[in-house]
Image (cartoon, rainbow, N blue to C red):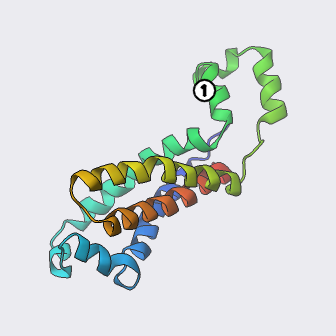
Amino acid sequence: MQINFIALFLAAIVSLVTGFIWYNPKVFGTIWMRENNLTPEELKKGNMLKIFGLTYIFSLMITMTLMSLTIHQSGAVGMVGGPPMLDSAKPSFAAFMADYGMAYRTFKHGALHGFMSGLFFAFPLIGINGLFERKSWKYIFIHSGYWILTLTLMGGIICGFA
């Protein structure tokens, strides 16, 4: 199973592009700022190179996890010990990959798994943090919606093209 690293690098950009749109004042940005008690002036004070650079690195980390959640064949590769052990795998592995190596490798399938990751993983994490931080449901839904959309798109790209 070959990994298309270009697809992973592009999928990581999705978090930035989606964020530019989602948190734009014309979409949810004004509500988000109000829920966080932030002003546009305060947001301009941040080190944007650091913020966007680390966001991209964290997004690359997410792509690695999403790859295992969206591409079912990665489980089979893991069962033989990972990529370094593929050459010494039993013939049944090669037969399995010949039969099923590209099964469910579509944007649509990856988007479904990305959506489920957002709904059943990101939303609960954000919800738990938001509840303990005494944040509003608007805050929780804005961030959860962003991650559900972002993970849906990332999952689709990873499964369809990686």
Q: Residue furthest bottom?
A: 26
Task: Indicate the secondary structure of the residue bearing disc 1.
Answer: helix
Q: Tell me if residue 159 can be seen.
A: yes
Left or right of 159, for residue 30: left
Residue 155, percent from left and from top: 58, 52
Left or right of 28, for residue 161: right
Q: Residue at x 67, y 27 (%)?
A: 76
Q: Which residue is mark 1?
A: 83
Q: Is residue 45 above or below residue 123?
A: below
The picture quadrant where one finds residue 56 is: bottom left
Q: Residue at x 80, y 26 (%)?
A: 96
Q: Nearer the viewer, residue 25 or 83?
A: 25
Q: Residue at x 61, y 47 (%)?
A: 4
Left or right of 78, for residue 143: left
Looking at the rendered structure, the kind of residue marked 1 is: Pro
Quarter of the image with the N terminus in it: top right
The picture quadrant where one finds residue 67 is: top right
Q: Is residue 104 above or below residue 151?
A: above
Left or right of 29, for residue 121: right
Q: Residue at x 16, y 80 (%)?
A: 41
Residue 101, percent from left and from top: 76, 36
Residue 14, percent from left and from top: 49, 62
Q: Is residue 89 above or below residue 155?
A: above
Mark 1: few/some/many CA within 10 Å (<14, 14-19, 20+): few
